[in-house]
Image: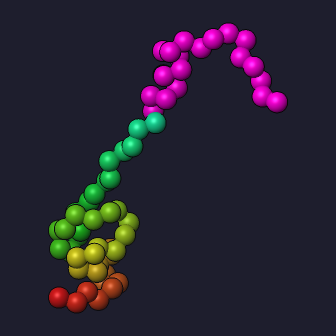
Amino acid sequence: MSICPKNKSSRARRDSRRANWKMSSVNLVKCSHCGALMLPHRVCKECGYYNKKEIVKVEA
């Protein structure tokens, strides 16, 4: 059994709880090696570098 509300919640109070349920945009940074846009703290898909070191060999 769930708890019954004592009073009715207004539309403004109800909708204000849901005001922060929005999606955020993806944060992109420039690769330090090739300059392509990439996700931070991940290997670059264009050149295969991370933190100025080659991690994955990318075929041209």
Image check: 36 left or right of 57? left
- Indicate left or right for 55 with 58 as reference: right
Does the image show residue 52? no
- Residue 34 picture location, percent across and down: 17, 74
**Where is residue 22, by image quadrant?**
top left
**Residue 16 shown in magenta:** yes
User: What's the magenta region?
Assistant: 1-20
Whether the magenta-drawn stretch holds residue 28 is answered as no
Q: Quadrant of the C terminus?
A: bottom left
Q: What is the quadrant of the N terminus in the image?
A: top right
Q: Residue at x 73, y 11 (%)?
A: 6
- Give me the residue at 78% from left, 28% from top: 2
The quadrant in which residue 36 appears is bottom left
Query: Residue 24's x, y, as percent?
Result: 37, 44
Residue 30 higher or lower than 2, as above or below: below
By secondary structure, the bulk of the magenta-drawn segment is best described as: loop
**In the displayed structure image, the side of residue 55 where residue 7 appears, left or right:** right
